[in-house]
Image: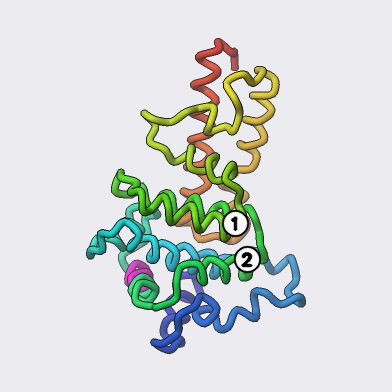
Amino acid sequence: MSVWGKLAAAITDTSVGATTMGALLGGGTRYDTPEREKHDAPADDAMPFTMGMVTLGAKMAKADGVVSKDEVHAFKKAFKVSDAEMKDVARVFKRAKQNAAGYEAYAEELVTALRGDRKLLEYVLEGLFIIANADDVMYPQEEKYLTHVAKVFGFTDADFALIKARHTIEAERNSYDVLGVKPSVRNEELERQYRRLIAESQAEEFAARGMPKEFVRIATTKREAIKEAYEAIAKERNISS
């Protein structure tokens, strides 16, 4: 069964009164038990990752103060989810928006479900930025929401600034901020940082972890922003490739 099918089953099997991600995932025990083997991670991480993207995306949909029927379409536009699968996504969106539990509860449970995996949590945050930018507008309330989620995930202000820089519209993007370096950086250090960031942004590695193919855009968007930033600086400094 695909992760989208499991998502539908989780919603079908969960009582209407359930308010947390743990409840939607069947109590969360199969994700946070010590007995869980590391080699099972790719298969097991896809479900909480997907649930986290949808539920936190739904909570963010209310952050801009504009709640409309087009919210779910922002998710579809961001990740090219099929019409059939969007029906299940819409149900999770509706459930998350109606639940009394705050987004902090979902974010905290996602950290537990993913065992504090920093890379996956960063991908979730990157994905939320993509959803927020789907209408080409980043509302102040959305940025505030993303800042709080990042803190729950354990990211520092510097971490958040680096991620945010990658999702600033290209015309306003600071290439040095995207790479997390200062304008005074030496060329050798600049290249090392660039290669390190590129190595951490492989779409193939993302897919190999069992993530749904629809979310591969998260990795490719990150990689493209890093590549464009480096090329802009290299052109400015006349660095040969």
On screen, residue 91 versus residue 104, left or right, reads: left
Along the line of sight, the residue nearer the viewer: 105 or 220: 105
Quadrant of the image occupied by residue 101: bottom left
On screen, residue 194 versus residue 2, left or right, reads: right
Instruction: Report the residue that reaches farthest toward the top.
Output: 238
What x and y, as percent, mark residue 86?
34, 67
Q: In percent of the image, x 55 and y 69: which residue is there? A: 48
Dot label at residue 120:
1
The segment highlighted magenta reads 85-90
On screen, residue 49 versus residue 80, left or right, reads: right
Q: In percent of the image, x 39 and y 73: which residue is there? A: 96
Give the prevailing secondary structure in the magenta stretch: helix
Which residue type does callout 2 highlight?
A: Leu
Which residue type does callout 1 highlight?
A: Leu
What x and y, as percent, mark residue 130?
41, 49
| Quarter containing the C terminus | top right
Residue 241: say if magenta. Answer: no
What x and y, as percent, mark residue 124?
52, 56
Residue 225 against residue 8 in the figure, above or below: above
What x and y, as percent, mark residue 75?
36, 58
N-terminal label among 1 and 2? 2
Residue 74 against residue 20 in the figure, above or below: above
